[in-house]
């Protein structure tokens, strides 16, 4: 099969490209550096010619809900229209576990818009919702760090390895459209503050962590089990502990 990875030069995209190749399929990288702009549609028709499935792992760092909705809305509409013209038979999009339970986060607002368009579109689809990645805690600490201190919300998460998510995306794209949401998560729940502490220690970064809900785009609506997967989620094999060992080895 020919499987296009939209956002194929990013963190998840690169891993998805490798997973598709390992499975014996041809990965088509869709990115601006490859001459394709999904916000304008430039280069999409030529790139999607002969493609059997599309995996969308595009991302936005915007912190305004209107901006994220416009971004994901524009990109998704461009992609679906081009896929319909090219006769693509399966649209796979990476989303977030707990998306319907969080209202006050701008990124989640954009992803909901993305899912709405995919569900309503004419291209057969599968939505893969994943939990937070293993490096999420350190990312949060980086966003909130001021001097030698960083604020980290006491979130309960079930972190997953990027490579495990990429493997699921490749498998789903190579199969028939499901027309429903699939969840993928790591093997066990973790406390985000503890994850941040352990990750930063493994990297030799001395930071004082302050547990608080006043941490960037996070609020108490994310407390409890809101971000945890359901009982039918596919669990990746890579634990946070094993990922942490890799961080220590490369620090």
Image: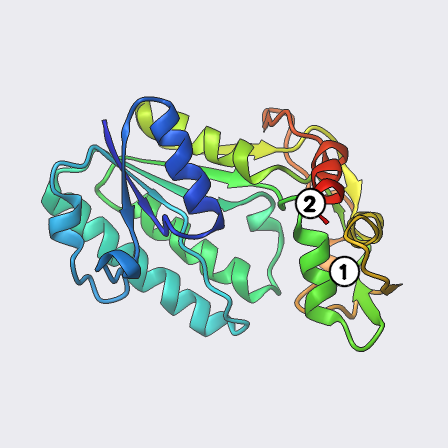
Q: Residues within 10 Å of mark 1 (few under 14, many from 20)?
A: some
Q: Position of residue 148 (x, y in %)?
A: 85, 72
Which quarter of the figure has residue 52?
Answer: top left
Q: Position of residue 47 (x, y in %)?
A: 16, 48
- Residue 178 shows in the view: no
Q: Position of residue 58 (x, y in %)?
A: 40, 54
- Residue 174 shows in the view: yes
- Label 2: which residue? 250
- Which is more N-terminal, label 1 or label 2? 1
Residue 105 vertical position relative to residue 155 in the rendered view, above or below:
below
Which is more toward the observer, 170 or 81? 170
Residue 148 vertical position relative to residue 211 in the rendered view, above or below:
below
Q: Position of residue 75 (x, y in %)?
A: 31, 59
- Label 1: which residue? 220
Q: Is residue 107 left or right of residue 175?
A: right
Local SS, label 1: helix
Q: Is residue 163 left or right of residue 20?
A: right
Q: Residue at x 45, y 67 (%)?
A: 68
Q: CA distance from mark 2 to mark 1?
A: 35 Å
State the residue lying farthest toward the bottom. 147
Local SS, label 2: helix
Q: Is residue 244 left or right of residue 49?
A: right
């Amino acid at each position: 099969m020919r499987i296009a990875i939209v956002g194929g030069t990013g963190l998840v995209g690169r891993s998805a490209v490798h997973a598709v190749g390992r499975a014996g399929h041809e990965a088509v990288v869709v990115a601006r550096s490859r001459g394709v702009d999904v916000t304008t549609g430039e280069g999409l028709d030529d790139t999607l010619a002969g493609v059997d499935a599309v995996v969308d792992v595009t991302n936005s760092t915007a912190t305004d809900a209107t901006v994220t909705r416009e971004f994901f809305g524009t990109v998704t509409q461009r992609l679906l229209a081009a896929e319909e013209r090219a006769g693509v038979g399966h649209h796979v999009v990476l989303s977030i576990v707990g998306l319907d339970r969080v209202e006050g986060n701008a990124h989640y607002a954009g992803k909901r818009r993305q899912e709405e368009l995919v569900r309503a579109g004419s291209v057969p689809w599968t939505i893969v919702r994943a939990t937070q990645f293993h490096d999420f805690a350190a990312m949060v600490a980086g966003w909130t760090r001021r001097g030698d201190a960083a604020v980290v919300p006491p979130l309960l998460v079930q972190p997953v390895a990027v490579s495990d998510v990429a493997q699921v995306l490749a498998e789903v794209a190579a199969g028939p459209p499901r027309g429903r949401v699939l969840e993928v998560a790591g093997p066990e729940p973790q406390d985000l503050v503890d994850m941040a502490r352990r990750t930063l220690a493994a990297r030799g970064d001395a930071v004082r962590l302050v547990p608080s809900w006043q941490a960037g785009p996070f609020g108490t609506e994310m407390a409890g089990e809101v971000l945890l997967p359901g009982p039918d989620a596919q669990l990746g094999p890579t634990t946070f502990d094993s990922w942490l060992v890799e961080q220590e080895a490369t620090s």
